[in-house]
């Protein structure tokens, strides 16, 4: 291990993160009582310019009027390059900051963006004598943000998570996408011809590099890595595949842009019973190995060593947190 210790973000379930446009109060009660680990009330891109001010009022009222005690609740403010962000932050945090767990900041481009928000929120929290500190969720969704991601991830102690905003990221890098977060048949490799001249076509994930980079930056600095939206909510199988890829890379969860995606996300980011049982057996086998002065042993024909303990411990800890939240 390096002498530098990584301070992990406050532990919080983040398997599913439901996006709810704050301009649509009819969706709020169901979101507050539903199965998403985190709900964010959106003041940004799901809200039309003319509806921004009313949406802000709706979000503040919802934070007061609904019971969010079984949820983590967040508000996505507008970007730093708009005319709305300062008032989003001032009004929401002044009027309902004691009801709010997280602020989601879109299109973060530099560490200074986070610093500016931190300064503003810190002043409001002090002025209002809030006892709880509001955390930040940062969306990395521009070429600039991706270029500066390591500095951004380390920019404030408030940062709890980095989110991959694949829709805006695609727009920013001018990728040719078909549906948000989905695959693209143009991003494929052809195998060499076999003896009969046949060639297979293997689709790739055009966002593999970006998401893997985000996971690395998050884990190197402490925040949770979270995958963003999958646009086609009629394609449950496509969502599942995207969520499984994200989980395999190390993400802790994925957005749900429709309530039907919540259970899909929760299922993919919850360790399965066989995974938990295996992790517990690894811990037991390694405890026995250590008692006998060994650093590595064989379990089910596979080598396990001290690195396996860390993975198993993380998995068991997560399973316990999920069980406690039920
Ligand atoms: C989310 O905000 C995205 O742009 O994908
Ligand atoms: Mg976006």
Image (cartoon, grey):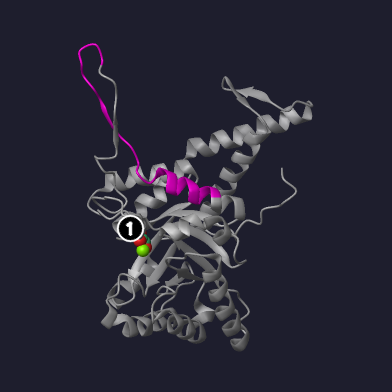
Q: Quadrant of residue 46?
A: bottom left
State whether residue 159 is above or below residue 47. Answer: above
The residue located at (41%, 68%) in the rendering is: 40
In the shown orientation, is residue 54 left or right of residue 81?
A: left
Say which of 269 and 232 sits in front: 232
For the N terminus, the image quarter is top right
Q: Is residue 146 above or below residue 311?
A: below
* Residue 292 pos. (x, y %): 78, 26
Ligand 2, seen in the image, is in the quarter at: bottom left
Residue nearer the viewer, 166 or 259: 166
The answer to whether residue 98 is visible is yes
292 is within the stretch colored magenta: no
Secondary element at tag 1: helix
Visible residue check, residue 37: no
How far from the left and from the top, in percent, is residue 200? Answer: 25, 25
User: Where does the image place residue 308, in percent across and percent down from the top left?
Assistant: 62, 34
Magenta span covers which residues?
194-216
Check the image and report above or below for 171 versus 308.
below
Q: Position of residue 81 (x, y in %)?
A: 41, 75
> Crowdedness of circle 1 by 10 Å Cα count: few (<14), some, many (20+)?
some
Q: Is 49 or 57 nearer to us in this picture? A: 49
Identify the residue at horizontal 58%, vertical 59% (top origin): 151
Position of 223 with respect to 198 (left or right) is right
Label 1 residue near ligand 1, CB within 8 Å: yes
Mark 1 lies on residue: 167
The quarter holding residue 112 reads bottom right
Left or right side of 33 for 217: right
Queried whether the magenta region covers residue 210, the answer comes back as yes
Above/below status of 67 relative to 54: above
């Amino acid at each position: 291990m390096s002498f530098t210790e990584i301070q992990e973000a406050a532990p919080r379930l983040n398997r599913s993160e439901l996006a709810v446009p704050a301009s649509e109060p009819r969706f709020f009660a169901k979101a507050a009582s539903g199965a998403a680990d985190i709900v964010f009330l959106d003041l940004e891109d799901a809200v039309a310019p003319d509806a921004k001010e009313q949406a802000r009022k709706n979000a503040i009222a919802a934070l007061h009027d609904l019971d969010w005690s079984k949820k983590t609740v967040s508000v996505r403010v507008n970007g730093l390059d708009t005319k709305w962000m300062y008032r989003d932050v001032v009004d929401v945090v002044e009027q309902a900051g004691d009801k709010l767990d997280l602020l989601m900041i879109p299109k973060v481009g530099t560490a200074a963006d986070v610093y500016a928000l931190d300064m503003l929120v810190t002043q409001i929290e002090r002025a209002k004598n809030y006892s709880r500190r509001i955390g930040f969720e940062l969306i990395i969704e521009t070429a600039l943000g991706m270029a500066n991601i390591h500095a951004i991830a380390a920019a404030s102690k408030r940062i709890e998570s980095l989110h991959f905003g694949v829709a805006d990221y695609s727009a920013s890098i001018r990728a040719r996408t078909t549906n948000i977060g989905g695959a693209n048949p143009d991003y494929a490799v052809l195998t060499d011809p076999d003896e009969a001249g046949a060639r297979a076509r293997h689709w790739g994930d055009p966002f593999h590099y970006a998401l893997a980079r985000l996971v690395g930056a998050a884990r190197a600095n402490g925040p949770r890595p979270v995958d963003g939206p999958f646009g086609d909510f009629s394609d449950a199988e496509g969502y599942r595949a995207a969520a499984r890829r994200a989980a395999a890379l190390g993400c802790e969860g994925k957005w749900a842009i429709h309530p039907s995606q919540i259970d899909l996300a929760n299922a993919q980011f919850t360790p399965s019973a066989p995974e938990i049982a295996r992790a517990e057996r690894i811990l037991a086998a390694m405890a026995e190995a250590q008692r006998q002065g060994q650093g590595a042993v064989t379990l089910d024909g596979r080598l396990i060593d001290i690195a396996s303990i860390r993975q198993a411990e993380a998995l068991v800890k997560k399973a316990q947190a999920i069980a406690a939240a039920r």
